[in-house]
């Protein structure tokens, strides 16, 4: 009973207009049982925790946050979902894959069951300073550290940053997960623990500035860590500035038609729309085309919210819609600026049988080819 | 701030704003026998109401109602009408007010101008400049009257666009000047300052409309077939750019979706209030679509329907009986599909998510405080309510303000419909007259 009261108050459920704008904007609502409006109402009227096991659809949420961004009453259904996921975890109504991810994050500091000492393997043959040697930290993140495809993004980005004369270090094998996804899976406690660990690492190394690969990590540091005296940047901000200030010399042209997919955590949630585009457009020869659904109404790729560890019953994947749209626009490359978007869209290229027709590349990978 | 004696009060009134509320207030004061200055920023009186096609719930022709009142305002012996003019400064001077009014140069001698329109016909920019009165859907010349029924019916040369004004040169000599038989064109005109002293001020400065581009998910400004309610008014008006035919890219829309509460009741754009007129103007517009395109599918997406005025609920029911489908739930996405747009929303009553293909989407944009409203309130010492409209003295008295002798009329005090604006204006006129009559 006590908890039910808290949810109502915490998420101001009595204020909800029931206008359905959250549902209409939700990327998964038309193909899943997930209905944020009903969830808000039901939790106001009933003790949902008592029958939480019936609410398995809350695992479909991608945490894109469109529901909260557009709520006319300024409410945050996405946070209610997080809290309800927390109940499920407590009650043990949770998929094995999610348990594994959480346990791995707790034990190894990453949700992929990868050993700590392999975290900096991507730097092989690429000398990178230690965090203690610079006031600027390049926080690599879990996916770019371990995923064989996305490691190349960390490498390209390191290349771009170095060429721009940006001084930076990395935490290397000391780096742990920022906890953004962990929090969105509903494990608030583990998020706190990971964030405390990272905060003391930042302090120990006297870090004044963080640059992230992933918009998810960027969002966590920027909006959820309450960091004092530390500036947080997504890499596209740093690179766009370096190009503007002519610290990066673009020497080669690229004759390609390219579109850009806005990640929810960078665009919708943090309003960083222009810098990624500025970088792409600064490369001569590129024919840049926009998706109809871009910027504030970019289509979610469904990679966030812990969905990397959740099997859903969903039929059509939005990432497939996305790559098909890109092909129909004649794009040869979809540029991304988020490791999750890279994985979901690359996967979609395969499942939609579009290999050879379109490539998914990170902005840093596109840029380094032109330097 | 309360004044003890009104012995030195000047029995004249300044009305700021020449929309329906300002005209009503000025006429009422003038009819009581007092001299009234009516200051209007644009070249003509009429305001927003003059742009409307029909008024709810009676479907009266707005122009037919307002035009006689505009003419009366222009002709009234007690009203000194100062159009294309603005308040440069205004301050309390004892119990009176001292104001400096800036009369902008029209570059047309209004004494000579016969309103024939030869200048506009001859203008080299004819048909090239978006006409504000038509919400930029129609085009005008640099020499123009905002609309044919303008009062005064005197031409104005747009200083932002006219080549002679902006570049100092228009061909060999300005075509308008050559065309004007009355010799009214005068590029030598300068702005003039007029100082007036009055015993009371009625503020009737009106409102801005919410800029729908602030809701990028709705695609306004990106798709031609997503328009605002006021643009729809011009589209459906027989004096509008399409002569009253509802045409989108030359075609009659067969599926029309209206979206309510755009920029109203919305924390994301810091407008928490209800704009009070959109429910009914949308119902009226839906009726007009039904009337002009009987086979069109018409859908209205809403949160709550507020039909609180006299005859409003009956009108709402009438529109429903005409086959307009009200679907509860706000769209969150509008995107392109060929030459149509898709409106994605949840019907919250049916619990059903739907994607409606539409040829035309009309956004019911709400009422906002004017962007320049602070300039006046700072000079006068007027307060604002948290919604940024001018503050009434107390919630039971929406005409008086915190400054003795300053009264509010119309939407500058808060969103309201025409009958309410007119009633408030009459009240403001009565209170202003009472104040200045004290001397007698």
Image: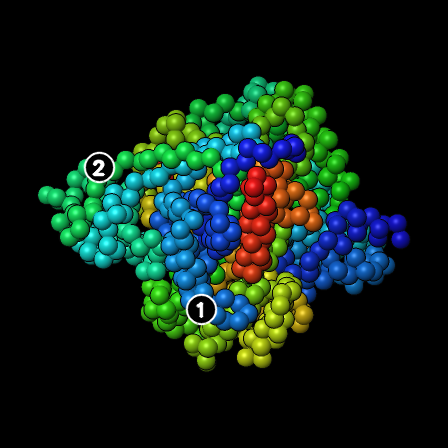
Q: Which of B209 and A309 is in front in this view?
A: B209
- Residue A68, given in percent of the width and then of the height, sits at 64, 50
Would you name the residue on which mark 1 appears?
Answer: B61
Q: How far apart are marks 2 and 1 (CA)?
A: 40 Å
Subunit of label 1:
B
Residue B217 is left or right of residue A104, and the answer is left
- Residue B387, given in percent of the width and then of the height, sits at 61, 45
- Residue A217, given in percent of the width and then of the height, sits at 61, 38
Q: Residue A33 carries which label?
A: none
Quadrant of the rendered image containing residue A112: top right
Residue B332 is left or right of residue A249, and the answer is right
Q: Which of B338 and B192 is in front in this view?
A: B192
Q: Are marks 2 and 1 in contact (CB under 8 Å)?
A: no
Instruction: Give the quadrant of the C terminus of chain B.
Output: top right
Tell me the residue at 23%/57% (across/down).
B116
Pointers 2 and 1 within a single chain:
yes
Subunit of label 2:
B
């Amino acid at each position: 009973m006590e908890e039910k009261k808290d949810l109502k108050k915490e998420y101001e459920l009595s204020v909800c207009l029931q206008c359905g704008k959250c549902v209409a904007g939700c990327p998964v609502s038309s193909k899943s049982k997930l209905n944020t409006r009903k969830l808000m109402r039901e939790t106001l009227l009933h003790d949902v925790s008592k029958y939480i096991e019936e609410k398995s659809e809350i695992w479909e949420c991608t945490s894109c946050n469109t529901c909260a961004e557009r709520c006319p009453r300024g409410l945050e259904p996405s946070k209610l979902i997080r809290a309800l996921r927390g109940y499920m975890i407590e009650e043990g109504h949770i998929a094995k894959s999610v348990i594994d991810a959480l346990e791995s994050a707790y034990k190894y500091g990453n949700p992929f069951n990868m050993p700590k000492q392999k975290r900096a393997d991507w730097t092989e043959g690429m000398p990178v300073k230690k965090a203690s040697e610079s006031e600027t930290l390049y926080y690599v993140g879990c996916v770019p550290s371990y995923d064989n495809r996305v490691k190349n993004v960390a490498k390209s980005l390191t290349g771009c940053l170095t060429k721009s004369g940006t001084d930076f270090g990395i935490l290397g094998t000391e780096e742990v997960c920022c906890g953004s996804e962990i929090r969105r899976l509903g494990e608030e406690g583990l998020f706190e623990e990971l964030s405390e660990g990272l905060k003391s690492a930042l302090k120990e190394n006297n870090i004044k500035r963080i640059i992230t690969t992933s918009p998810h990590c960027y969002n966590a540091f920027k909006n959820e860590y309450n960091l004092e005296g530390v500036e947080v940047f997504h890499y596209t901000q740093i690179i766009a500035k370096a190009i503007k200030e002519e610290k990066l010399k673009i020497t080669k042209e690229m004759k390609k038609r390219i579109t850009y997919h806005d990640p929810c955590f960078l665009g919708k949630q943090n309003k960083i729309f222009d810098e990624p585009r500025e970088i792409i457009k600064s490369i001569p020869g590129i024919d840049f085309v926009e998706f109809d659904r871009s910027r504030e109404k970019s289509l979610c790729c469904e990679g966030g919210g812990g969905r990397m560890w959740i099997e859903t019953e969903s039929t059509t994947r939005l990432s497939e819609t996305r790559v098909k749209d890109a092909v129909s626009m004649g794009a040869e490359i979809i540029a991304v600026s988020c490791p999750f978007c890279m994985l979901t869209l690359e996967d979609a290229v395969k499942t939609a049988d579009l290999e050879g027709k379109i490539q998914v590349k990170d902005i840093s990978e596109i840029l380094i080819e032109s330097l | 701030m309360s004044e003890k004696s009104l012995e030195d009060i000047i029995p004249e009134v300044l009305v700021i704003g020449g929309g329906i509320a300002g005209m009503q207030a000025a006429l009422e004061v003038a009819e009581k026998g007092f001299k009234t200055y009516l200051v209007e920023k644009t070249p003509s009186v009429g305001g927003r109401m003059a742009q409307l096609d029909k008024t709810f719930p009676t479907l009266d022709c707005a122009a037919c109602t307002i035009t006689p009142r505009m003419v009366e305002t222009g002709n009234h012996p007690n009203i000194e009408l100062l159009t294309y003019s603005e308040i440069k400064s205004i301050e309390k001077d004892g119990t009176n007010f001292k104001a400096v009014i800036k009369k902008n140069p029209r570059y047309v001698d209004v004494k000579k101008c016969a309103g024939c329109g030869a200048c506009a016909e001859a203008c080299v920019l004819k048909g090239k400049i978006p006409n504000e009165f038509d919400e930029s859907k129609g085009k005008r010349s640099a020499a123009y009257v905002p609309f044919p029924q303008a009062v005064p019916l005197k031409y104005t040369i747009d200083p932002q666009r006219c080549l002679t004004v902006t570049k100092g040169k228009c061909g060999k000599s300005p075509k308008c000047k050559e065309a004007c038989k009355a010799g009214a064109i005068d590029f030598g005109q300068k702005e003039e300052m007029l100082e007036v002293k009055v015993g009371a001020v009625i503020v009737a400065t009106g409102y801005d409309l919410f800029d729908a581009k602030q809701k990028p998910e709705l695609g306004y400004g990106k798709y031609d077939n997503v328009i605002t309610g006021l643009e729809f008014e011009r589209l459906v008006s027989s004096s509008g750019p399409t002569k009253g035919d509802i045409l989108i890219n030359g075609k009659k829309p067969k599926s029309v979706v209206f979206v309510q509460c755009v920029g109203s009741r919305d924390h994301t754009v810091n407008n928490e209030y209800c704009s009070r007129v959109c429910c009914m103007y949308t119902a009226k517009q839906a009726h007009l679509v039904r009337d002009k395109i009987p086979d069109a599918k018409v859908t209205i997406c809403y949160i709550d329907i507020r039909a609180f005025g006299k005859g409003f609920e009956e009108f709402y029911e009438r529109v429903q009986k005409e086959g307009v489908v009200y679907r509860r739930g706000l769209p969150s996405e509008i995107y392109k599909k060929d030459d149509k747009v898709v409106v994605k929303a949840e019907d919250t009553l049916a619990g059903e998510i739907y994607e409606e293909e539409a040829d035309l989407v009309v956004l019911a944009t709400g009422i906002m405080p004017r962007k320049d409203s602070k300039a006046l309130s700072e000079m006068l010492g007027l307060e604002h309510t948290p919604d940024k409209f001018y503050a009434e003295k107390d919630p039971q008295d929406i005409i008086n303000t915190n400054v003795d002798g300053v009264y509010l009329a119309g939407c500058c005090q808060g969103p309201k419909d025409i009958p309410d604006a007119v009633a408030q204006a009459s009240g403001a006129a009565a209170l202003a007259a009472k104040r200045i009559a004290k001397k007698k």
